[in-house]
Image: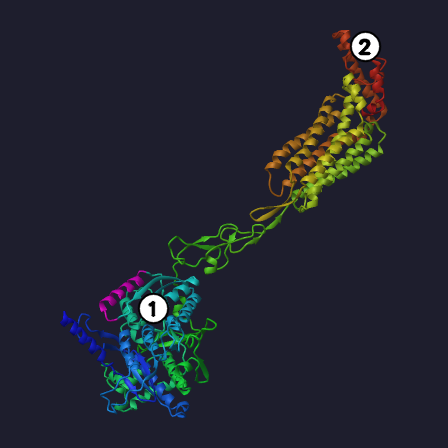
Amino acid sequence: MPLLVLMSLILVTETILIKPNRQGATVPGDIIIGGLFAIHEKVKNYTDLYSISPPQFPNCSGFYTSGLTQALAMIHAVEMANRSPMLTSLNITLGYRLRDTCYDVTTALWAVQDFTQSYVACDSSTNSSEPDKPTMAVIGASSSEISIAIARELNLFLIPQISYASTATILSDKSRFPAFMRTVPNDKHQTRAMVKFLKDRSWNWVGAIITDGDYGRSALESFVSQAAEEGICVAFKEVLPDSLTDQEKLKLSINRTVNTIVKNPKVKVVVSFAKSIQMQMIFMGLNGEVSNKKVWVASDNWSTTKDILKKVNLTDIGDILGFTFKSGNVSVFAQYLRDLQHNSEDEINPFLKEFIKQPDVGNITVAVDKLLKQDNSDMFFSVQLAVGAVAKAVAELCLLAQLRKVTIEKEGVNYNFDSDGDINLGYDVSIWQETENEVYKSDKIAEYDLFYANFTYTKKDQYAFESVISKCSNTCEPGEFKKTADGQHTCCYECSKCPENQYSNGTGKFYMGQCYMCDKDKEWSDSGSTRCNSKTQEYFEWNSGFAIVLLTLSALGIIFLFMISALFIWKRNSPVVKAAGGPLCHLILASLLGSFVSVVFFVGEPTGMTCKVRQVMFGLSFTLCVSCILVKSLKILLAFQMNFELNELLCKLYKPYMIVCISMAVQVIICALWLNLCSPFKDKKSLLKSNLMECNECSDVAFGVMLGYIVFLALVCFTFAYIGRKLPQKYNDAKFITFGMLIYLMAWVIFIPVHLTTSGIYVPAVEMVVILISNYGILSCHFLPKCYIILFKKEHNTKDAFLKNVYEYARKSAENIRSSSEAEPESKMSNSVYTISNPQLVSPLENVSAPKPDLKVYNARDAMMPDISATI
């Protein structure tokens, strides 16, 4: 046990005393800038965790050409700054220390030790007592995962760090990373641009692939949340391991990702934030497995790394759309690369020497050619901005504080860090294209503006990816809405038609999710409608054929009334007119006029006034009509068919105009109460496609009482007329009154069930028909026979013909009395009912043997003889 402790202490001591690895490119200067670049793609191996040997510097493998060109961009930018008047006037030069991160966090932390620790270079050819100058700023790294790790280390010494490619959103948090800055936007802008690009093409069913770590997780979270806001669903999310050392684990993840892509054929668009080497492995795994080509949306992490297609064809993969940072003119750097082949061996840095020794390179000329083919202009420009910012801050003699405020000018354009320490350049969208020599290049098709959050398309060509459809379900057509099952993605749904009185008139997430209600009071729509239609106003219109017929009948009735009234006035002294009621018949004609006129108020669009007028006008006018006919019926009954005792009483009560006034007063009270307590009003009944404009009677009870009262008077009138139906045939008003009242009663009995079961615009027409039937019934039965006699049977319209008719009726009545007296005892005959009011009308030629009537009866009837004779 003590031995083990002693060995552990020795190992710790050796670890502390071990020097940081100083392999890299170094150039002295007054101000030293550190540089971290991924010269190699991965770490080959680490010290065995169970070994007790001291830690060793990682062994990197897989030369990364893009990382070398980025490092050369920094060297060129430093040389340009040293030649600038800004530094030469101050007699200050910049030096650099470039280190390889190997795309590995641990390796990068080893390199950072060279920037943060002071030590004596014992093996230096110069004065060994002179220490190395401290690193004043660090350019890098490209990976967000590495930048986050080294930023924590550099924060301890407040060494400014400017990254040219790390985009993780977390790095914008100045409370945790006060010394970190970058010359590119953070990932929230890139994911927003991606979502905008997907939305513009209606790609709402996509996959996502990331590399595990702070960068990948942050980018995925930002992308998914912003995609959800725009109605874009992520069908699958594949997370690949950050470490490339464990090849077995990496292959399992790659195979899983490939299977996921193959099993989702509807996902035609895949967004990837993975590493370039991982995407190369995925493409190799998919080669020949994907029947339908896909669109690959590449983040800045691999959008310019064309080497990943060495072992596959672009035509087999589909289309690759790369999001890169906007850049400026880097033609000067291209010339710098061409001039490298003229440099001596001593002027070539160790990284470039290693590149020349690669099997596929061999010499400086081939190396330069391969470097020129690297399409990393955005990275080169970002590196130049970073070095330019350091140079400007050095000139201000206050490095960290001044870096936040520095303005870098490039070709007349000024660039500044924002409050988060970012330079928001914007993005370019490029499509990968294959040339004849199987060399891949990018063709910029669009630019994204961060401020306005929109794209400006620089190419108008119709690319193949424009026709790609990446949806779980087809877009619902206008008039449909999407119906999503529980547990499903919102992008997977069925399209169903909007129900009645609902509509949808567009597509996209703001329309397909639901149908909108029509205003049921004003609008309607059928199932599957794209808009609401305005409801029409329906009512019993004036131009309706049925309305024209009914109005014509009403007009004809009014004309007949005026003609009959004129005829009766002309023949007012004739027996027929007197028998028809004399002045009372003109009152009946006036009431029928009001009833005919009331029909007009049932046609046309109802108003509050017409709804009140039409029922009241008909009720009052027809009540007047029936009241007058009731008086006539009562008078006829008094003349011929009354018992003596009852006759004597009714003769005293018989006041024609008073009876009419009392009957009318009752109806006036009913209508007045109706109008004051619950008056009829204009109402609107909403139908499916229209609004039915109608009159609401408000109180069916009041309406029924008004009609019921008229029916009651008609029944009384009918009863009286029926009793007196056996009057002289040629002047028998009782029979015609009976028919008239019977027609009225039958019409209104039929009206009740029809009115209750009828709906729509023809409800007013039903009542109009009943009113016209009632009016024409009275007109036909009460007045037309009289007109016929006056016009065509003038010989019957004389006093002699009238008396002859009465005489014959009296003779027959006498014979009936005589036969009755022979059959009954005299005591009973003394109380018999007399059927003739004036026995003197009986001809003396007839020897009628009859009991002597009571003189009181004659006296009572003689007082009424003028009117009664006229009635007969």
Residue 262 magenta:
yes
Pointers 2 and 1 in contact (CB under 8 A)? Answer: no
The residue located at (85%, 18%) in the rendering is: 859
The residue located at (82%, 36%) in the rendering is: 566
* Residue 741 drawn above or below residue 693: above
Q: In the rendering, at what x and y percent does residue 183 appear?
A: 39, 78
- Quadrant in which the C terminus appears: top right
Q: Mark 2 highlights which residue?
A: 851
Q: Mark 1 highlights which residue?
A: 216
Q: Quadrant of residue 346?
A: bottom left
Choose between 327 and 470: the one closer to the eye: 327
Choose between 175 and 720: the one closer to the eye: 175
Choose between 370 and 836: the one closer to the eye: 370
Q: Amino acid at mark 1?
A: Gly
Q: In the rendered structure, which disc, 2 or 1, sits on the residue that comes first in sequence?
A: 1
* Residue 304 drawn above or below residue 668: below
Q: Does any portion of residue 842 appear in the rendered image?
A: no
* Residue 14 drawn above or below residue 247: below
Q: Amino acid at mark 2?
A: Pro
Under circle 1, the secondary element is: helix
Distance of label 2 from label 1 (alpha carbons)? 133 Å
